[in-house]
């Protein structure tokens, strides 16, 4: 592994307040940086704000203040937001910083002197939202596809950068360097785009139309186009051309961006770097978008999610965990509070939190408040240790491959393996047999030791919570180094403070849906097919995950005469909570300990304040629900075809 990483977020436009999408990019960048540090790398993390251009001027005018005052305010909002989200950037750049302006002018002058910038009359279609001229071919029904409004038509004299002359070079770079743009489909998108002739780039705006920008050094009747100015922040921040940081970090630059700005980073930017005589970036890492309510977030739809409001509900670290765990890096993902809470309750409260709590509590109770000694190690311990040795490496590989969701999925799996190990070793029974004391110590030591490794792996994602977890394991607050994430490092006899639950289960506020209303899609409810029957495609059927579940406990839901709430074992190392409308037909006692069939991949829903994470299947005998039993010998979690 190369040991130096310069890692950047896009610099955010200050025309709107920070939202969950901006927060995601910055959190993902922060998490990757923290992991690299853990792997021993020397890192430098840059973020900042993009403050010039037409859309900023328009937003300032709407607020009735001067652009400078406006950008000062919103830039400050971004700067103050990041520490609240546990983001530790090394530098925050603003494109209105004098050093940045000087750098942009120097590079423009250099390229101008090389004869690669020229003046010409131009007519084009400008989208203020994108802050760029669009090609006719990019429009959808005459509208910008991203902003769904028609671009404005401008006819004016402007300066152009001879970007077209870099087309062949760029195509070759993209073809030969397969890992330059990640995930690969974005590289293909760029190659596809470059099949058409590349146009020269308009890099100025006449001051009589827009004067909020950096003066062109060779003609003060023009300001610099906002993207040409913004992209250069990555170099100006390090003190190009002579800065010490520039020499140290530039060759190792990794840009993390959203897919909306692929073209500017994948086409304009490398051509600009090449023209300026700078080595191009090491890697462009592209993530998808958070979608809210099925649509892109927008002020007009009123679906913009404020990260601080979400953090107040879930806690910062759990919000970071959810964002990284639930978005497959590179793809779009749906954001709902319910999914976030389900993830929190499932992975953090029930799985990992429970593991930590019960292993600490049992150790304290049986070993005078200390980490128990490790006795003879049996096959079960060898197996789990091996899973962890491989698991730590898998997580490292996933992080280095920009797949944080996979790394976290693996951590959750490892955690459930330890819970299963505890369940199968039954330390609560061992504790009742004095002759099993050594075995009890071995089981609890192993559980605590594995929990320690999980705490280490989760440290970059949940820095504050994992600091608390380290203290709970009697380890002190310092980060656990990656090389210590190996079994057997925990010191027996270390004092374990009284545990406080790290992740209290979130009970969701009251909702008046019923399972039937909420779980049957609207379409199915109203549609009566003519023949009384609609065929289900086999592929659609296969999408359903049917599993055998073991109901471990069941209770009536308060405020409801119809709903039962069961804790169901699906062999995942933690129990799922499932609400069913069967209270008129079964008592909780009759439900408990039954093997049942469960639809395991139904979208979680909130029912009377509980999040239901699946559906138990009943047959409906003229309105009377009858449980469909699975044979007792089938293990929980087994798939049903
Ligand atoms: N100022 C330019 C970037 C210049 S970089 C030299 C810009 N700014 S922006 O404020 O619009 O931020 C865009 C970035 O914010 C996206 O590329 C992405 O990183 C993040 N996101 C904005 N909305 C998002 C989602 N809905 N979901 C995930 N990330 C999103 O473009």
Image: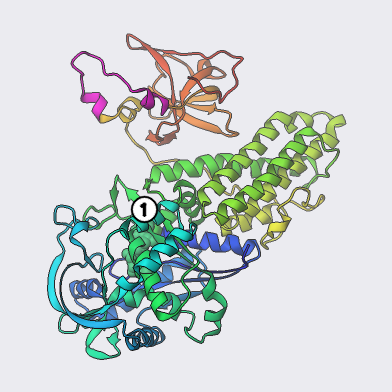
Which sits in the foreground, 463 or 564?
463
Dividing the image into four quarters, tell me where ligand 1 lies.
bottom left
Tell me the residue at 42%/30% (across/down): 558
**In this rendering, is residue 46 above or below 563?**
below
Q: Which quarter of the rendered picture does the N terminus lie within?
A: bottom right
Magenta span? 523-543
Q: Is residue 526 left or right of residue 46?
A: left
Above-or-below relation of 633 to 341 = above
Q: Quadrant of residue 214?
A: bottom left
Q: Is residue 156 left or right of residue 500?
A: left
Residue 153 vs 422, above or below: the answer is below
Where is residue 373? Give x, y as percent.
83, 45
Query: Where does label 1 land, which residue?
Result: 289
Is the shortest distance between ligand 1 and the CB of mark 1 under 8 Å?
Answer: yes
Please give the count of numbered marks on the rendered protein. Answer: 1
Nearer to the camera, 380 or 142: 142
Q: Say whether residue 430 is left or right of residue 58.
A: right
Quadrant of the image occupied by residue 47 = bottom left
């Amino acid at each position: 592994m190369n040991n130096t990483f310069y890692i950047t977020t896009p610099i955010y436009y200050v025309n709107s307040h920070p939202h969950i999408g901006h927060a995601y990019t910055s959190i993902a960048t922060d998490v990757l940086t923290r992991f690299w540090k853990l792997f021993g790398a020397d890192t430098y993390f840059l973020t900042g704000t993009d403050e010039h251009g037409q859309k900023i001027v328009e937003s300032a005018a709407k607020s009735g203040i001067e652009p400078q005052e406006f950008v000062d305010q919103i830039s400050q909002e971004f700067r103050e937001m990041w520490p609240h989200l546990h983001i530790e950037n090394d530098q925050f750049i603003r494109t209105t910083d004098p050093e940045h302006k000087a750098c942009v002018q120097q590079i423009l002058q250099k390229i101008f002197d090389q004869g690669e910038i020229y003046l010409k009359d131009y007519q084009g279609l400008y989208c203020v939202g994108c802050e760029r001229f669009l090609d006719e071919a990019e429009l959808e029904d005459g509208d910008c596809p991203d902003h769904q409004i028609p671009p404005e038509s401008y006819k004016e004299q402007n300066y152009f950068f001879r970007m077209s002359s870099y087309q062949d070079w760029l195509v070759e770079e993209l073809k030969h360097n397969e890992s330059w743009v990640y995930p690969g489909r974005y590289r293909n998108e760029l190659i596809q785009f470059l099949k058409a002739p590349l146009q020269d780039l308009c890099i100025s705006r006449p001051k009589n139309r827009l004067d909020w920008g950096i003066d062109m050094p060779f003609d003060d009747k023009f300001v610099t186009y906002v993207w040409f100015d913004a992209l250069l922040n990555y170099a100006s921040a390090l003190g190009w051309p002579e800065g010490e940081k520039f020499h140290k970090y530039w060759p190792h630059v990794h840009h993390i961006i959203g897919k909306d700005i692929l073209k500017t980073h994948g086409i304009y930017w490398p051509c600009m770097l090449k023209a300026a005589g700078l080595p191009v970036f090491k890697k462009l890492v592209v993530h998808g978008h958070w979608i809210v309510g099925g649509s892109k977030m927008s002020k007009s739809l009123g679906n913009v999610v404020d990260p601080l409001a979400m953090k107040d509900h879930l806690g910062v670290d759990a919000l970071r965990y959810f964002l990284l765990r639930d978005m497959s890096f590179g793809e779009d993902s749906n954001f709902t509070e319910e999914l976030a809470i389900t993830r929190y309750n499932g992975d953090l409260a029930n799985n990992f939190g429970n593991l930590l709590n019960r292993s600490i509590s049992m150790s304290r109770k049986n070993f005078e408040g200390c980490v128990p000694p490790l006795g003879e190690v049996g096959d079960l311990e060898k197996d789990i240790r091996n899973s962890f040795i491989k698991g730590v490496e898998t997580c490292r590989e996933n992080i280095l491959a920009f797949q944080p969701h996979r790394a976290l999925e693996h951590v959750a799996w490892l955690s459930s393996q330890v819970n299963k190990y505890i369940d199968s070793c039954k330390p609560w029974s061992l504790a009742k047999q004095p002759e099993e004391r050594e075995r009890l110590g071995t089981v609890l030591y192993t559980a605590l030791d594995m929990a320690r490794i999980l705490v280490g792996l989760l440290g970059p994602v949940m820095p504050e919570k994992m600091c608390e977890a380290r203290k709970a394991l009697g380890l002190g607050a310092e980060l656990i180094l990656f090389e210590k994430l190996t079994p057997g490092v925990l010191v027996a006899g270390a004092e374990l403070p009284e545990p406080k639950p790290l992740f209290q289960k979130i009970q969701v506020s009251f909702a008046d849906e019923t399972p039937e209303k909420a779980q049957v899609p609207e379409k199915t409810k109203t549609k009566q097919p003519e023949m009384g029957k609609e065929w289900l495609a086999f592929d659609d059927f296969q999408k359903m995950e049917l599993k055998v579940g073991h109901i471990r406990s069941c209770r009536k839901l308060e405020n409801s005469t119809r709903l039962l709430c069961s804790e169901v074992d699906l062999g995942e190392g933690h129990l799922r909570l499932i609400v069913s409308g069967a209270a008129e037909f079964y008592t909780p006692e009759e439900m408990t300990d039954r093997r049942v069939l469960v639809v395991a991949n139904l979208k979680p829903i909130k029912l009377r304040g509980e999040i239901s994470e699946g559906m138990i299947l009943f047959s409906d005998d003229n309105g009377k629900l009858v449980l469909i039993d699975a044979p007792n010998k089938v293990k929980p979690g087994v798939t049903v075809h």
